Amino acid sequence: MLKIAVAKGRVANKVSELLLDTSDYRDIIDLSSRRLVFVDKNKEITFFLVKPSDVPVYVESGAADIGIVGKDVLMETGNSSYEIMDLKTCSCRMVLAGPSENRDVRPIVRRIATKYPKIAEEYFKKKSEPVEIIKLDGSIELAPIVGLSDAIVDIVESGKTLRENGLIVYENICDITARMIVNRVSYKMKNKSINIFASAVGEAIEGGEVNAQSVVMG
Ligand code: PRP
């Protein structure tokens, strides 16, 4: 049985769309239900829906063989599973953003609110800018509005949330897409079934393919 942990929300929506384009996995996940586990005994495959930040935990522990989750989560958690595929979907950007009155020159920022303390810390460390990182769990855009922080490090997809809250992008940090990760032991023990599933997903991605060079063996 191949076990696949899929990040709930945007990634799960996109993955279930992609699976509709495969012949073998199209009718397994039903996002209209509240179920968290979808099993197909004939195809020997199980999908779990989990909170995005928990996907690496399921995969590293072996509770799932495969995980599908945003690169933002992988960067933040520093996961040690193999990253075998860029699904080239759920594209967004990690940015430094803040109040729009500072349009011409990026102001000096000292307090940064974010759901991604590790990414923010590394970013400012590289720039040798000392900052205080304030970890929040959501609605990050609120922090500079109410004076909790000078700026935020967050993901931007359409840009609507920033715009509607009077914030602008100061700097791009990196591009983010959904990735497929694999448990290190499963990669050896279930290599054939993992490759069959990854190939089917790869074919469903327009112009996508399993990129062997993206396999992290470290
Ligand atoms: C994310 C992110 C931004 C928003 C960006 O939040 O933190 O708030 O999406 O999307 P947009 O550029 O298309 O407006 P999410 O929806 O995950 O909710 P959260 O506030 O709970 O983090």
Image: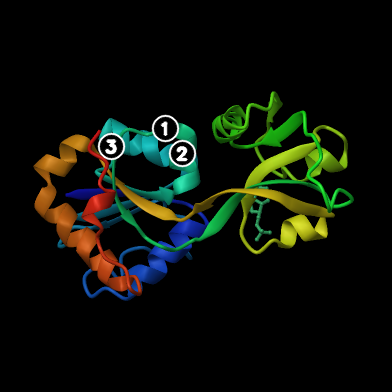
- Residue that label 2 marks: 75
Q: Nearer the viewer, residue 212 or 74?
A: 212
CA–CA distance in space, label 1 to label 3: 18 Å
Q: Nearer the viewer, residue 37 or 81?
A: 81
- Looking at numbered disc 2 in the image, what kind of residue is underneath it? Met
- Residue that label 1 marks: 78
The percent coordinates of residue 61 (x first, y second) are 29, 31
Q: Is residue 149 above or below residue 196?
A: above
The percent coordinates of residue 172 (x first, y second) are 62, 50
Within 10 Å of disc 3 (Cα), the crowding (few <14, some 14-19, many 20+) is some
**Among numbered discs 2 and 3, the one appearing first in the sequence:** 3
The structure residue drawn at horizontal position 25% and vertical position 58%, both measured from the top left corner, is 211
Q: Quadrant of the C terminus?
A: top left
- Looking at numbered disc 3 in the image, what kind of residue is underneath it? Ala
Within 10 Å of disc 1 (Cα), the crowding (few <14, some 14-19, many 20+) is few
- Residue that label 3 marks: 63
**Figure quadrant of residue 107:** top right
The percent coordinates of residue 101 (x first, y second) are 89, 51
Contact between labelled residues 1 and 2, with CB atoms less than 8 Å apart: yes
CA–CA distance in space, label 2 to label 1: 5 Å
Residue 51 bears which disc, if any?
none
Instruction: Answer left or right for 187 relative to 87.
Output: left
Contact between labelled residues 3 and 1, with CB atoms less than 8 Å apart: no
Q: Is residue 125 above or below residue 4?
A: above
The percent coordinates of residue 194 (x first, y second) are 18, 53
Instruction: Answer left or right for 83 relative to 155.
Output: left
Q: Is residue 33 visible?
A: no
Q: Secondary structure at mark 3?
A: loop
- Looking at numbered disc 1 in the image, what kind of residue is underneath it? Gly
CA–CA distance in space, label 2 to label 3: 21 Å
The structure residue drawn at horizontal position 46% and vertical position 56%, both measured from the top left corner, is 177
